[in-house]
Amino acid sequence: MLLKRIFDFTIAFLSLILFFWVILICIFVASIDTKSLGIFLQERIGQYGKSFKIFKIKSMNDTTQQISSFGTFLRQSKLDELPQLVNILLGQMSFVGPRPDISGYYDKLEGEDRKILELKPGLTSEASLKYANEEELLKQHANPLYYNDNVIFPDKVKMNLAYYYNRSFFVDLRLIFRTVFR
C-alpha cells in the first residue's frame, strides 16, 4: 500500500520534527534515572518474520532490573515509544499494525495465523488498545507468562488476523484517532 507508506513517512517525519525536543529531554532524564544511556534497543520480529531493532526510551534500571520512577511515567504516558517514529521512517514499522513482539511469538505462528507476518508491525492496533494495561493485567495472575501465552497472545493473534482481512486506510485512521483520543 503506497498510500499507507506515504502517510506513515510524512506523519512520522513531521512528528519527529515536532516532538524531537520531547524525545531528547526524555532520553536525558531517563539516562539520569536509570544511570545508563536512556535509549533502549531490542530485537523484535517484523514484517515477513524478519528481525529489526526497535527504539524506545529506557524505562528500566540495568542493575536492579526494576522499572525506574521516571520509567513508570514513560510507560503510562507511552512516551517511551516516541523513538519508534524512527522505525516508521526506516520502513520497519507503520503507525497501525500488530505490535512487534520478541522472538518466540509471531515468528512461531502456523497456518493462516502466519498471514499476520505479511503486515508491518505498528505503534497501535485493536489489540494494543484492548491490552493497553497489559502489565497490570499480567500482575493479577499467579503465572503471568502462562496467562500471556494462553489467553492474551491468542486473543491478539485473532484481532490482528481480523485486521489483516479488514485493513484499509480508513480503518487505520480510525485506530489512530482512537489511540490519540483514548
Image (tube, rainbow, N blue to C red):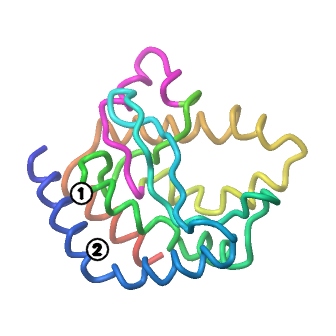
Residue 122 sits above or below residue 177 on the image: above
Judging from the image, what secondary structure is the residue with disc 2 in?
Answer: helix
Counting from the top left corner in percent of width and height, residue 4 is at: 16, 52
Q: Describe residue 71's horizontal placement relative to residue 44 as left or right.
A: right
Q: Earlier in the sequence, mark 2 or mark 1?
A: 2
Counting from the top left corner in percent of width and height, residue 97 is at: 36, 48
Estimate how packed mark 1 is, as few (under 14), some (14 to 19) or many (20 or more) residues with alpha carbons within 10 Å.
some
Tell me how far mark 2 sits from mark 1, CA to CA: 10 Å
Location of residue 53 (image quadrant): top left
Image quarter where the N terminus lies is: top left
Counting from the top left corner in percent of width and height, residue 40 is at: 54, 58
Residue depicted at 60% across the width and 74% down the height: 31
Q: Are marks 2 and 1 in contact (CB under 8 Å)?
A: yes
- The label shown at residue 144 is none
Q: Which amino acid, by three-letter code, is at mark 2?
A: Leu
Find out whether residue 113 is within the magenta segment.
yes
Q: Which amino acid, by three-letter code, is at mark 1?
A: Leu
Q: Which residue bears the numbered disc 1? A: 89
Q: Describe residue 14's horizontal placement relative to residue 124 as left or right.
A: left
Q: What count of labels does the image hold?
A: 2
Judging from the image, what secondary structure is the residue with disc 1 in?
Answer: helix
Counting from the top left corner in percent of width and height, residue 8 is at: 21, 59
Q: Which residue bears the numbered disc 2? A: 16
What is the span of residues highlighted in magenta in the rendered image?
106-124
Residue 170 sits above or below residue 108 on the image: below
Estimate how packed mark 2 is, as few (under 14), some (14 to 19) or many (20 or more) residues with alpha carbons within 10 Å.
some
Residue depicted at 42% across the width and 69% down the height: 82
Residue depicted at 55% across the width and 31% down the height: 103
Q: Describe residue 9's horizontal placement relative to residue 124 as left or right.
A: left
Instruction: Spot the residue most to the front.
Output: 36
